[in-house]
Image: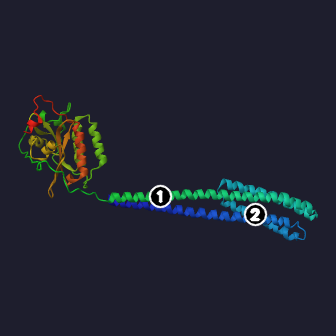
Amino acid sequence: MRVTVVVGTLTVLSFLAHQIRLAELTLDGEQNVERAFTDLSWTLTLTLADLRAAGQAYVAEGQDRLYWTSKVTEHLATVADSLDNLRRLAISPTSIEALDAVSATMAELETIDRRAREHTSLDQLLLASDLLFTDGQELAARAASQVDLARSAERTLRNETVRQTRTTQTQLLLGGVGISVLAMLLLVPGLRRSGAAPFSDEAQEEPSIETSGETAPLSSEDRLTLEDLDLGAAQADETEAPSAASAGAMPDLRLAADLCTDLGRLADPGDLAGLLARSADLMNASGLIIWVRDPRTATLRPALGHGYPTRTLAAMGAIPEDGDNATAAAYRAGQMQVVEGSEGGSGALAAPLLASEQCVGVLSAELHDGWEASPAVQATVAILAAQLTTLVAPTADNDEVSPAEAHG
């Protein structure tokens, strides 16, 4: 699992780094194109100003008309080339529309220039000057304003693209940080609590019961008081304890939630044995026993179990409520009791089944690998005990002795 987490994290981080690098290349490209578009547009604006000045010069007195007309022709060609370059770089609809307007204006300006040259060749300088200083000036100014509009629109659109790309880079970076933190949390090993809950009396492990002899099946007094529940058919007959679900002292909370849901929705009593088996797997237990209080004899009797043969449960017999063991101590104190296992041995937990007014029984579990000392396991056992309490009802008996009499 650790190897999978490490490899998966490195793969995701590599992908995120690649995406951030691609975004950075996109940013560089956008910024370079924006700078090139700005430079070309300013150059075009200056060329339009030179074009307007050259057009006015070749109708001025004492100027070389051939020189200035060639300059006008040169500037018109430069403007056309600049417009073609700007169209290839433009991506904003507004800037493209503005550049098209500049092209239309330049076509009108070329027409004005041809007419002015015709008037000049006929020595009609007054008519040529009127065209260049009125219509020519207005068209050149209009073209310059359209170039400024295209430059502004292109800069705005590309700046927005840069902003969105920066936002995407930030999100990718934060995602990488979050994944790294999650991976580190998954790789941190769970810590076990070395201490255990105190006993009211000195806790001892449940005594083992020899099962060599034949015994009678459990009577109805030893069974859960659920309507139409046949516990004899529900008891597990496995002869071997199930293996632990995992090696760590951390039950799967999702499995625990599903188990509690299924216990709450239990409709068929025959399904209870399977739910106890799932409970044992969840908490790494080799065996579970539900002890039910018998008020007539002030004892706790094994009503249902998992991981033990049926004859073993029957042979265990009743435990006195004031007995010197963890099960009786959990019943008397109404608190969970912990029996820590010795080296290589099993430990145990005993959780009381607390109803609204009294304790109606105890859930005991024999655990492997020191799971009894885990706070998470203890909490899980307490939750299961609370859920099982709803299936166990106190036995109604007119001759029931009082708690004071039962305890002496």
Amino acid bearing label 2: Val
In the rendered image, the vertical position of residue 231 relative to residue 161, given as above or below: above
Determine which of the numbered discs, if any, sits on residue 79 in the image: 2
Amino acid bearing label 1: Leu
Instruction: Describe residue 345's horizontal placement relative to residue 256 as left or right.
Output: left
Q: Provide residue 77's location: percent of width, then percent of height.
A: 77, 65
Q: Quadrant of the N terminus?
A: bottom left
How many numbered dots are placed on residues in this image?
A: 2
Determine which of the numbered discs, if any, sits on residue 222 in the image: none
Residue 274 appears in view: no
Q: Provide residue 64's location: percent of width, then percent of height.
A: 88, 71
Viewer-proximal residue among 261 and 357: 357
Spatial separation of the CA atoms under disc 2 and disc 1: 44 Å
Residue 247 falls in which quadrant of the image?
bottom left
Q: Provide residue 74's location: percent of width, then percent of height.
A: 79, 67
Q: Are marks 2 and 1 in contact (CB under 8 Å)?
A: no
Determine which of the numbered discs, if any, sits on residue 172 in the image: 1
Q: Quadrant of the C terminus?
A: top left
Instruction: Describe residue 33's horizontal placement relative to residue 295 as left or right.
Output: right
- Disc 1 crowd, CA 10 A, few/some/many (<14, 14-19, 20+): some
Q: Residue furthest right?
A: 123
Q: Provide residue 356's location: percent of width, then percent of height.
A: 22, 36
- Disc 2 crowd, CA 10 A, few/some/many (<14, 14-19, 20+): many
Q: Residue at x 11, y 43 (%)?
A: 312
Residue 97 falls in which quadrant of the image?
bottom right
Residue 31 appears in view: yes
Q: Earlier in the sequence, mark 2 or mark 1?
A: 2
Q: Residue furthest front?
A: 404
Residue 313 falls in which quadrant of the image?
top left
Viewer-proximal residue among 395 and 273: 395
Disc 1 is placed on an element classified as helix
